[in-house]
Image (cartoon, helix red, strand yellow):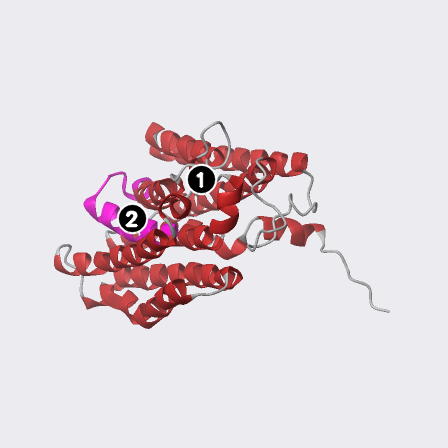
Amino acid sequence: MNSIQSPSTFTIWFEAARPKTLAAAFVPIMVAAGLAYANDTLLYFPTFVALICALLIQIGTNFANDYYDFIKGSDTDERVGFIRATSKGLVTPKSMKNAAFLTMLAAFIIGLYLVWHGGLVILAIGLLSILFGILYTAGPFPLGYNGLGDVFVFIFFGIAAVMGTYYVNAFEWTAQGFFAALSVGALCVNILVVNNLRDIQTDVKSGKRTIGVLFGEKALKLEYVFMLLLAYAIPPHFLVQEGYNYWILLPFILIPFAVKLCLTIFKHTEKAALNATLESTARFMFLFGLLFTIGLVIG
């Protein structure tokens, strides 16, 4: 008789970190590095440290979400999303809470190098990123429960991550950094949009007021399309206004992929099917970011 083996401790924690969505931490650093290279200001070690901090902050945020969603009763047996370790009893609430704290602490300690390198403005960005990563699901007014999750993701995984990383390379804030951040932030938001579209029914029951709950599924679908359009508006800006050549338009190779994602968003019939769409959205973000970075480097 075959017995069902329990997942290993490593597997449990690896899945709790939600590796399928870590493109949201990797792509901002990659795009900022590409922009710094294009402007002859790339510093490899500060960029590497920024990447480690970004990954740790996102993983810490994911651990905090796992814990606080369980505490608030949002993760139930009706959930159709990926397995949450705390709600499934794979990790104790105390262990998950400690993991979130230790991961954020590691990000802070490692990030002190960037503070020494880039100044107090980097300290402010880092502390706010950590704070709001926790407040996404924690506290008396959790952002993700009050329709502000999209704003948080756009600002911190887009604007702050790209511009902050560019700053520790070039020691200046630029319009190019801002516009590059818009495309990255938009694609990060779309990962959350798919998540909220998938969970809209259980979010209603748990009192979680995402944009989908507040304004309906159509609002989420339109938001997804708008964010894609925003992302695709940025490469032509770099071509026309910033003096880059046609290599900067490389992300347009992915237009068929983008159209397919939009069709899935509008025509899906089963919420569970959106798990694959979420993974595809993260994959699209990575590919878009990679092609955009290549365009920056050789453009």
Q: Is residue 230 left or right of residue 63?
A: left
Q: Within the image, what quadrant is residue 258 found in?
A: bottom left
The local crowd at label 1, few if under 14, some if 14 to 19, many if 20 or more residues have their Cα within 10 Å, is many
In the image shown, does 293 or 224 lie closer to the viewer?
Answer: 224
| Residue 96 screen position, x and y as percent | 63, 39
| Residue 289 screen position, x and y as percent | 35, 59
| 171 within the magenta span | yes
In the image shown, does 15 or 88 lie closer to the viewer?
Answer: 88
**What residue is shown at x 32% (from left), y 53% (from top)?**
223
Write the start and end of the magenta stretch as one range.
167-189
Q: Amino acid at mark 2?
A: Ala
Per the image, label 2 sits on a secondary structure element best described as helix
Q: Amino acid at mark 1?
A: Gly
Q: Main secondary structure of the magenta part?
A: helix
- State how far apart marks 2 and 1 are (Cα): 21 Å
Foreground disc of the pair 2, 1: 1
Q: Which mark is residue 181?
A: 2
Quadrant where the image shows the C terminus: bottom left
The vertical placement of 99 against 37, above or below, is: above
Per the image, label 1 sits on a secondary structure element best described as helix
Q: Which residue is mark 1?
A: 144
Q: Is residue 139 left or right of residue 122?
A: right
The local crowd at label 2, few if under 14, some if 14 to 19, many if 20 or more residues have their Cα within 10 Å, is many
**What residue is shown at x 52% (from left), y 43% (from top)?**
205
Q: Which mark is residue 253?
A: none
The vertical placement of 11 against 162, above or below, is: below
